[in-house]
Amino acid sequence: PHPVKLAPSLLACDFTRFGEELRAIEGADWAHVDVMDGAFVPNISFGLPILAAARRASPLFMDVHLMIERPERYLRDFADAGADGLTVHVESTPHIQRAVDMIRDLGKKVGITLNPGTPLEALRPLLADVDLILVMSINPGFGGQKFMPSSLERLRTLRRWLDDSGSKVELQVDGGVTPQNARAIVHAGATCLVAGSAVYGPDGAQAGLERLREAIK
Ligand code: DX5
Ligand code: ZN
């Protein structure tokens, strides 16, 4: 099969041991950074200073998932704090194209995403302007939720759209990814798996990462 990136979500790590938790995932491809504002989603996670600390502590690609209203207000700040990629929700701003252009102008990888209830058509006009498409396989806001099986069909549809246009954009999945469903997700066309609770489990992130890798081998 195609190469697959693993992106552990720091949301699930033990923040009392933040530096160690970052080192434990250095064998991964990206670090996924979930920013929540308590308005776009019903939870508050963390923001700029935590991203800046992660940036100082780790050489990993910082894949920042912005679950905030009108993200264009803060794109420059997140770029300055160390983001390598910035992913914005189509539902989070009336000016998604402007947000996409801003990320591009900041020199960062451009990601767009949508909630499970949003029709995929919302992405279509943007496909040529992005580096990454994130399919949310849960309603965002919390880690540890159950993967929505309907996401597989959404992945397959996007995979078809991308292949039909010869596009090489990253197709990422976020929410409820486990060693049990990872293979099906990859078969549906995903090229990057985000995983929080499946990586940062009781036996540590290295073991969690290893189990995911095995599952998609
Ligand atoms: C949820 C976040 C996810 C979350 C995934 O809103 O976007 O990245 O951390 O956690 P798991 O893998 O536990 O579903
Ligand atoms: Zn996320």
Image: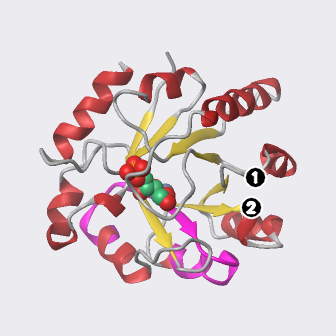
Query: Relative to the observer, which residue lies in front, 41 or 217?
Result: 41
CA gap between label 1 and label 2 equals 9 Å
Query: Relative to the observer, which residue lies in front, 26 or 38?
Result: 38
Where residue 65 appears, as percent x and y from the top left, is: 53, 62
Q: Farthest top residue?
A: 1
Where residue 88 appears, as percent x and y from the top left, is: 65, 63
Count the numbered circles shown: 2
Amino acid found under the numbered disc labelled 1: Thr
Where residue 118 appears, as percent x and y from the top left, is: 75, 52
Q: Quadrant of residue 170?
A: top right
User: SS class of the residue under badge 1?
Assistant: loop
Residue 125 visible in rendering: yes
What's the colour scheme? secondary structure
Q: Quadrant of the C terminus?
A: top left
- Answer above or below: position of 36 versus 200: below
Q: Residues within 10 Å of mark 1 (few under 14, many from 20)?
A: few
Q: Disc 1, disc 2: CB below 8 Å?
A: yes
Q: Residues within 10 Å of mark 2 (few under 14, many from 20)?
A: many
Q: Residue at x 75, y 25 (%)?
A: 160
Q: Which residue is mark 1?
A: 118
Q: Is residue 143 magenta?
A: no
Mark identifier at residue 90: 2
Instruction: Please provide the residue range marked out in magenta.
Output: 55-79
Amino acid found under the numbered disc labelled 2: Val
